[in-house]
Image (spheres, helix red, strand yellow):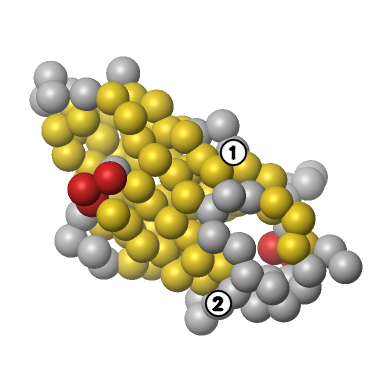
Amino acid sequence: QVQLVESGGGLVQPGGPLRPSCAAFGRILSINSLDWYRQAPGKQRVLAANIGSSGSTNYADSVEGRFTISADNAKNTVYLHMNSLKPEDTAVYYCHADVTAISRSRTDYWGRGTQVTVSS
């Protein structure tokens, strides 16, 4: 069993930065990819950023150039460096991981989410 624990959300003024993080705990052999999704009120959950095991990254057009995803493989932790935040970035941010366990089974997991609110 693997758990994803997010932290670092909160209230920030427009234009400000925030850096939520997500740590994976459990019997992990390898993490194949890590993603940040976000779900705004009344909208579907959508992918914001992704990082693969090789370090390759992908971003939604809406966050490209403002957000950077990074991972600390030794700590099984992924970060989302958010800059120039806008009110429309307000959402619950969810961590998602594609994990191969020590048992060799491969499963994807979700965190419980962390609220990010951009408002003056």
Q: What residue lies at 23% left-to-right and 42% top-to-bottom?
A: 31
Quarter of the rendering containing residue 50: bottom left
**Residue type, mark 1 in image:** Gly
In the rendering, at what x and y percent does residue 60 appear? 51, 67
Instruction: Check disc 1 and report its element: helix, strand or loop.
Output: loop
In the rendering, at what x and y percent does residue 87 appear? 79, 66
Quick check: 8 left or right of 36? right
**Residue type, mark 2 in image:** Arg
In the rendering, at what x and y percent does residue 90 appear? 73, 57
Instruction: Check disc 2 and report its element: helix, strand or loop.
Output: loop
User: In the image, is residue 89 above or below residue 104?
Assistant: below
Count of marks overlaid on the render: 2
Q: Which mark is residue 113?
A: 1
Identify which residue, 70 or 109, lies in the foreground. 70
Going from N to C along the chain, the mark reached first, 1 or 2, is 2
Identify which residue, 109 or 25, lies in the foreground. 25
Quadrant in the picture for the N terminus = top left
Q: Which mark is residue 66?
A: 2
Q: What residue lies at 44% left-to-right and 44% top-to-bottom?
A: 22
Quick check: 64 left or right of 26? right
Identify which residue, 8 or 95, lies in the foreground. 8
In three-dimensional space, the C-alpha distance between marks 1 and 2, rounded to whole angstroms, equals 20 Å
